[in-house]
Amino acid sequence: MDRNRCALHNARMVESIERKLAKLAEADEHIDTAESLIARQLSLLSDLQRDGHSTENARALLEAMRESLRQMHAHRRLIEAEPDN
């Protein structure tokens, strides 16, 4: 009986770790996407500035994107800190 309980416990641990790894992979994907979008926004901002256009809205959007990225990193750290049970 103890062997079966141990096997069940191990199986649950593996499932928990796999779920955590999947969450981390998804968080990493979202972070990568956000970083790419921020790079694109920086390029567009540069183009607007070069061409003499207002950059106020583009800068506000960039700051919102950066804040979202900070929140994504914070969320990833929370996932990392989750116990593997």
Image (cartoon, grey):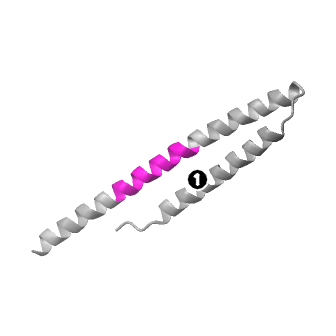
Would residue 51 appear left or right of 63 to someone viewing this image? right
Residue at (90% x, 27% y) in the render: 52
In which quadrant is the N terminus drawn?
A: bottom left
Would residue 49 appear left or right of 70 to someone viewing this image? right
On the image, the x and y values in percent for residue 16 come to 33, 61
Q: Which residues are magenta?
A: 17-31
Q: Nearer the viewer, residue 18 or 34?
A: 34
Q: Nearer the viewer, residue 85 or 65?
A: 65
Q: Amino acid at mark 1?
A: Met
Q: Quick one: label 1, few (<14), some, or many (20+) residues within 10 Å?
A: some
In which quadrant is the C terminus drawn?
A: bottom left
Residue at (46% x, 52% y) in the render: 24
On the image, the x and y values in percent for residue 18 come to 34, 54
Query: Does residue 23 sit above or below 82 in this rendering?
Result: above
Of helix, strand and loop, which one carries label 1? helix
Query: Does residue 35 sit above or below 43 in this rendering?
Result: below
The residue under label 1 is: 72
Q: Nearer the viewer, residue 6 or 20?
A: 20
Q: Would you say residue 20 sits in the magenta stretch? A: yes
Residue at (73% x, 43% y) in the render: 61
